[in-house]
Image: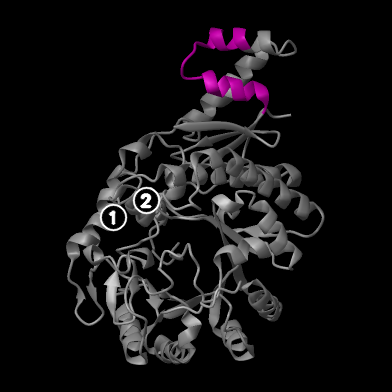
């Protein structure tokens, strides 16, 4: 399968199964688009009439190049990976990442929060050190030969249980050597409790921090309010600026959510840039379509324009010597994921699990509180192997709709929680999310093509 | 000027043999 599109002055051809990316001129673009449906004569007649300067010999040269790429498996290549999916599903599962819910409580009251103000539709509760320690032991015990293990401190607001976070990191560091593991910690915070102690600790121990800010003050404060109903912008922005400045070259993400109320989200990106942040992520809100802030079909064309504008902003800022990154546009074409990663997705329910403050195990943070997806606990392990097996087989090859999608090896079937929330089935398809994802990938690859064009680098 | 420029990309087919170590970051 191939995908052809034009964006920002570039003609781009993607080959799904091989992962190849081609930047082509107008003649090659037309030739490739007609290649499988028309005879050489028909292609030559069409192109020579459309482009008077192009001769039949030129068309023959292009068609020869296309045939060579096809023979090399870089164009119209066959998807041969289905057997690998079956083999992956038969592997003994190992767990390599935990989302540690150290606090099912929050000091903000964000209306759009999927975690229902951090409580996940349950009681306010903090994880004890003993539960957290057992969770880390559970991770090590079930990680097989994996060396790199990941733990995200999540909530609610994890800094409401900061002492336990510090003790758990110290414990993990104390067992790394003897167990032959390396822990990679991340922290997701709303910033309200950031102080010098937290900043020093996070900059020493956290490989990445995710900082929640929605952009413009009026946008942020529409949803991200304190429990008392006060907007959080003026409280958190100075703290985030201090944090990021102290962080040096360590990674962070300023992560916002956009809704129906701010489909012009590049203005929020601009606000983040103006505030001095340059590692950014803006995500579409995920909520029932009946919510007043849910994204609508009418919003989609504008969102597509916004994603294109964002890509152009990145090109302009890079030219000006003020580059910034956007999470979804960070593709590494040469050192990106292998085919096994691309067909196994994010690993939810198999190698990535969420742990509640009382030690229950769920497929990921978005399923926490849904008892249908309670998989077991950190003391007795996985009791619902049927849930794990279902997630093992949840990927781009488990959905009929993905068979005809050129982006399936970039998303691996997408987010199981989004599919479940949209359709009631983790193997369903959240079509709106697919449309946005495809647009983001088109923009991300265009940025790579632009980079190559300007560097003169080619194969 | 070439009409088709192919960018360097990881060979996904070859990664069936040189991939799958599982040490990469969880998305």
Point 80% across, 58% down: residue: A321
Q: Residues within 10 Å of mark 2 (few under 14, many from 20)?
A: many
Q: Find out whether residue A45 is within the magenta segment.
A: yes
**Which residue occupies the foreground of this view, A130 or A17?**
A130
What numbered label is drawn on residue A420?
A: none
Residue drawn at point x = 32 percent, y = 91 percent: A130
| A205 is higher (above) or lower (below) than B1 | below
Place residue A377 in its image quadrant.
Answer: bottom left
Where residue A220 appears, as percent x and y from the top left, is 61, 64
Image location (x, y in percent) of residue A40:
53, 11
The residues colored magenta run A25-46
- The answer to which of marks 2 and 1 sits earlier in the sequence is 1
Q: Quadrant of the N terminus of chain A?
A: top left
Is A112 on the left-hand or right-hand side of A380?
right
Q: Is residue A369 visible?
A: yes
* Subunit bearing disc 1: A
Q: Are marks 2 and 1 on the same chain?
A: yes
CA gap, disc 2 and disc 1 = 9 Å
Give the residue number, with chain letter if any, for mark 1.
A88
Quarter that holds the C terminus of chain A: top right
| Majority secondary structure in the magenta region | helix
Q: Which residue is mark 2?
A: A343
Which is more toward the observer, A19 or A309? Answer: A309
The quarter of the displayed image where residue A348 is located: bottom left
Helix or strand or loop: what does disc 1 sit on? helix
């Amino acid at each position: 399968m191939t995908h052809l599109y034009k964006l920002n002055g570039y003609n781009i051809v993607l080959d799904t199964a091989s992962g190849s990316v081609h930047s082509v001129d107008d003649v090659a673009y037309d030739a490739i688009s007609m290649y499988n449906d028309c005879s050489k004569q028909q292609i030559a007649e069409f192109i020579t009439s459309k482009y008077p300067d192009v001769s039949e010999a030129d068309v023959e040269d292009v068609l020869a190049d296309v045939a060579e790429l096809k023979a090399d498996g870089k164009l119209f290549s066959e998807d041969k990976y289905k057997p690998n999916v079956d083999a992956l599903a038969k592997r003994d599962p190992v767990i390599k990442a935990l989302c540690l819910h150290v606090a099912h409580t929050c000091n903000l009251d964000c209306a759009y929060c999927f975690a229902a103000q951090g409580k996940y539709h349950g009681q306010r509760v903090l994880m004890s050190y003993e539960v957290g320690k057992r969770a880390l032991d559970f991770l090590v015990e079930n990680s097989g030969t994996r060396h790199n293990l990941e733990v995200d401190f999540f909530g609610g607001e994890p800094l409401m249980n900061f002492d336990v976070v510090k003790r758990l990191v110290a414990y993990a560091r104390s067992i790394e050597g003897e167990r032959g593991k390396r822990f990679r910690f991340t922290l997701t915070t709303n910033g309200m409790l950031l102080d010098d102690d937290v900043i020093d600790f996070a900059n020493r121990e956290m490989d990445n921090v995710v900082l929640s800010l929605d952009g413009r003050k009026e946008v942020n404060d529409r949803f991200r309010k304190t429990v008392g109903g006060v907007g959080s912008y003026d409280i958190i922005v100075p703290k985030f600026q201090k944090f990021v400045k102290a962080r040096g070259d360590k990674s962070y993400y300023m992560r916002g959510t956009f809704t129906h109320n701010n489909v012009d989200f590049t203005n929020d990106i601009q606000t983040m840039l103006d505030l001095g942040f340059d590692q950014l992520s803006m995500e579409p809100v995920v909520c029932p379509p009946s919510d007043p802030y849910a994204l609508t079909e009418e919003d989609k064309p504008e969102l597509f324009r916004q994603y294109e504008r964002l890509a152009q902003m990145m090109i302009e800022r890079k030219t000006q010597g003020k580059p910034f990154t956007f999470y979804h546009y960070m593709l590494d074409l040469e050192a990106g994921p292998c085919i096994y990663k691309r067909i196994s997705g994010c690993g939810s329910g198999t190698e990535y699990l969420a742990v509640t403050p009382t030690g229950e195990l769920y497929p990921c943070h978005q399923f926490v509180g849904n008892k249908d997806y309670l998989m077991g606990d950190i003391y007795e392990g996985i009791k619902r192997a049927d849930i794990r097996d279902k997630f093992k087989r949840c990927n781009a090859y488990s959905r009929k709709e993905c068979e005809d999608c050129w982006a399936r090896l970039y998303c691996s079937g997408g987010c199981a929680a989004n599919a479940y929330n949209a359709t009631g089935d983790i193997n369903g398809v959240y079509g709106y999310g697919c449309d946005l994802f495809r647009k983001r990938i088109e923009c991300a690859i265009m940025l790579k093509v632009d980079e190559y064009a300007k560097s003169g680098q080619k194969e | 000027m070439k009409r088709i420029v192919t960018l360097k990309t990881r060979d996904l087919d070859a990664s069936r043999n040189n991939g799958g170590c599982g040490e990469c970051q969880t998305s």
